[in-house]
């Protein structure tokens, strides 16, 4: 149930920590796992800018940037074809560019398997775990 | 001198010597002097003759129009027993399904084109104590040799090939696993509902000076420019639900002839225990079954 | 004078009471009540015996000799379907197909079987397609063929809950990793979602259990004990 003003965790290393949903794409209903949304970066991770010296990788996005993202976890339970139900404790997303490729190179955190059916296999393979 | 006088004068001799030919036509041409067009020869006011279009308001024409949208065979009356889930053996998918039961469904009588203007099979289901039935219905059942039925419904069929013999028991195996049916039943009644619930209106503001009309509709129509009246069909509060609803193209998943159970895919309107009429789906090819001709 | 007469006038209504016992035997004819007098119902005129058929129409229907209620023959109904509860019937046939041995039923029917899964236990469910999922049992919904179990776990420090239909053909096996130490006094442990009650990750417990099991069964990876 991700809609306008929903705050999501960003779980990739693009540099965003918390983003806000401003638009759900291709859908008239609230977004769920696998849906593409437009987000505004609200908080950025401030590691890496001075310690590693590799600021380019650490912060690909800045606070206030408008980016596309894919929802990878949702608090709202989703039903699978065999009748089982999965829900997470938070809403999380991964930033992508306009072409649909992830901006970050790594992801930390579990994601839902529903991404596979929605042409987000790359994100699924980047994730350390999926449920 | 008025022409009327002339006419009167002219009439007298003509009546007396009226020819048989003019009597057949039913109109006597009157010869008037003075104004000729006073009594012009009349043609019939009915449009008769060859080459006229065939009327569309006859039962035959209606049947012809509905030829493609009438099922070939009758349906059945079932009772909705509830919903459950079945697992697809190959994919492991869980399919929501509705369980229906057929209870002593029999053909009660027929409606025919000659007598009633259309073809239909009247079906009855269940059993009702004769003491609780009107005499006219009892007589109807008795005349057809059927036990008193609780529910009676008609199922329209295309032609007389669809008229099952009276007294024929329709069991669950009337429907084949894998075929599609349309299920019509009354939805759950919601009572007198407001416009927000009944039609999904937005209601009015919680505040901004709105008092006591937070869930009511706004205006019922335009003012002087629009006729200063409420247009017919205006959505308003009223009784919601408990109206017939047809769910089309439900797949038959299971059939149990012994227990009269029919399991269909998906949901059907109405509470548990409601009467559901199921018939071959209109928008799918008819099931390949042999039609039983009328032989009662 | 005027006063006394008016009083007498008012009392005049009681005069009938005083006089009644005297009057009643006299007034036997009941002339005053002619209109309400009871009269016996006139006996029906017998139907004339040798009345020709053609005159029957002129007599009211109810007096006609041949009037008898028309007999309507009531036909007996055919046999009723035997199954009274089709939903239960469908569920039982489903269960027989999905769980022929009845072991899965025993494993989750926690109200009847002592060795079953109970709320608070840690279980591990393996699927035919997909990864296994382990977690604390929050609730067991006993609904016949639709029985489901709700598990909770923390994966990468994110709480994940999964409800599984236990008789789904997709579920390969269910094993109990750890039973709850103390019987939980609630059937639904939804309070475990609160941060102060959250059990955290059970991955370590499950890993331990798997290691032990492997040692017992003999270094076989991925072998799941079927229950």
Image: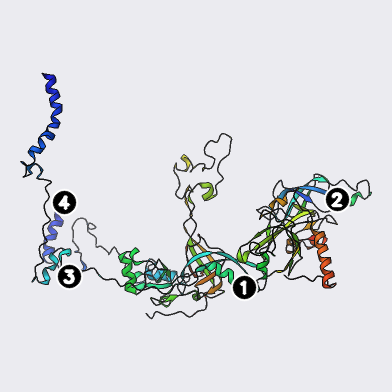
* Label 4 chain ID: B
Depth check, mark 2 against mark 1: the one in front is 1
Which residue position is annotated with label 2? A60
Is label 2 in a helix, a strand or a loop?
Answer: loop
Which residue position is annotated with label 1? C96
Which residue position is annotated with label 3? C66
| Cα distance in 3D space between marks 3 and 1 | 66 Å
Q: Is residue B40 left or right of residue C152?
A: left
| Cα distance in 3D space between marks 2 and 3 | 106 Å
Depth check, mark 4 against mark 3: the one in front is 3
Q: Is residue A93 left or right of residue B116?
A: right
Q: Have a look at marks 2 and 3 and say if they share a chain.
A: no
Is residue B8 in view?
yes
| Cα distance in 3D space between marks 4 and 2 | 111 Å
* Label 3 chain ID: C
| Cα distance in 3D space between marks 4 and 3 | 74 Å
* Label 2 chain ID: A
| Cα distance in 3D space between marks 4 and 1 | 107 Å
Q: Position of residue C200 (x, y in %)?
A: 78, 53
Q: Have a look at marks 4 and 3 and say if they share a chain.
A: no
* Disc marking residue B2: 4
* Label 1 chain ID: C
Depth check, mark 3 against mark 1: the one in front is 1
Image-quadrant location for residue B28 = bottom left
């Amino acid at each position: 149930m991700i809609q306008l003003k929903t705050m999501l965790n960003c779980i990739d290393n693009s540099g965003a920590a918390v983003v806000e949903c401003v638009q759900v794409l291709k859908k008239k209903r609230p977004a769920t796992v696998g849906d593409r949304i437009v987000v505004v970066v609200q908080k950025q991770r401030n590691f890496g800018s001075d310690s590693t010296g590799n600021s380019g990788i650490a912060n690909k996005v800045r606070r206030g940037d408008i980016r596309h993202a894919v929802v990878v976890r949702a608090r709202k339970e989703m039903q699978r074809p065999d009748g089982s139900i999965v829900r997470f404790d938070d809403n999380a997303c991964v930033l992508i560019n306009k072409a649909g490729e992830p901006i970050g190179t790594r992801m930390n955190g579990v994601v839902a398997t529903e991404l596979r059916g929605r042409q987000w296999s790359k994100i699924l393979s980047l994730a350390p775990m999926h449920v | 001198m008025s022409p009327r006088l002339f006419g009167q004068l002219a009439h007298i001799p003509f009546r007396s010597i009226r020819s048989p030919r003019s009597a057949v036509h039913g109109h006597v041409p009157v010869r008037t002097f003075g104004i000729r067009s006073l009594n012009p020869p009349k043609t019939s006011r009915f449009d008769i003759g060859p080459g006229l279009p065939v009327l569309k308001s006859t039962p035959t024409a209606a049947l012809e129009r509905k030829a493609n949208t009438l099922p070939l065979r009758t349906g059945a009356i079932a009772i909705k027993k509830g919903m459950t889930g079945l697992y697809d053996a190959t994919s492991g998918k869980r399919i929501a399904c509705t369980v229906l039961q057929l209870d002593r469904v029999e053909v009660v009588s027929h409606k025919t084109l000659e007598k009633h203007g259309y073809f239909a099979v009247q079906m009855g289901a269940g059993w009702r104590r004769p003491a609780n039935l009107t005499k006219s219905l009892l007589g109807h059942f008795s005349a057809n040799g059927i036990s008193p039925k609780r529910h009676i419904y008609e199922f329209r069929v295309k032609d007389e090939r669809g008229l099952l013999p009276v007294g024929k028991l329709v069991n669950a195996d009337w429907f084949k696993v894998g075929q599609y049916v349309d299920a019509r039943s009354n939805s759950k009644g919601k009572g007198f509902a407001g416009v927000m619930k009944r039609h999904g209106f937005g209601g009015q503001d919680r505040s901004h000076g709105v008092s006591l009309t937070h869930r009511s509709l706004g205006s019922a129509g335009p003012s002087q420019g629009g006729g200063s009246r409420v247009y017919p069909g205006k959505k308003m509060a009223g009784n919601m639900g408990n109206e017939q609803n047809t769910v089309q193209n439900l797949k038959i998943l299971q059939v149990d002839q012994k227990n009269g159970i029919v399991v269909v895919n998906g949901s059907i309107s109405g509470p548990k225990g409601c009467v559901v009429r199921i018939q071959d789906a209109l928008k799918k090819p008819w099931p390949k079954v042999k039609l039983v001709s009328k032989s009662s | 004078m005027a006063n006394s007469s008016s009083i007498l006038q008012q009392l005049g209504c009681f005069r009938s009471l005083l006089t009644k016992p005297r009057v009643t035997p006299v007034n036997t004819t009941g002339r005053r009540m002619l209109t309400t007098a009871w009269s016996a119902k006139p006996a029906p005129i017998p139907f004339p015996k040798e009345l020709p058929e053609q005159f029957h129409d002129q007599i009211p229907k109810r007096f006609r000799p041949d009037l008898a209620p028309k007999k309507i023959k009531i036909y007996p109904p055919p046999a009723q379907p035997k199954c009274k509860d089709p939903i239960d019937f469908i569920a039982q046939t489903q269960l027989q197909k999905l769980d022929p041995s009845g072991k899965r039923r025993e494993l989750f029917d926690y109200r009847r079987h002592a060795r079953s899964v109970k709320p608070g236990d840690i279980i591990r469910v393996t699927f035919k397609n997909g990864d296994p999922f382990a977690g604390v049992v929050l609730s067991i919904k006993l609904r016949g063929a639709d029985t489901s179990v709700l598990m909770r776990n923390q994966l990468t420090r994110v709480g994940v809950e999964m409800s599984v239909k236990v008789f789904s053909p997709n579920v390969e096996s269910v094993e109990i990793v750890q039973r709850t130490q103390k019987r939980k006094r609630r059937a639904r442990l939804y309070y475990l979602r609160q941060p102060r009650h959250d059990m955290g990750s059970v991955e370590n417990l499950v890993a331990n259990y798997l290691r032990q099991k492997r040692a017992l069964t003999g270094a076989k990876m991925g072998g799941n004990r079927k229950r």
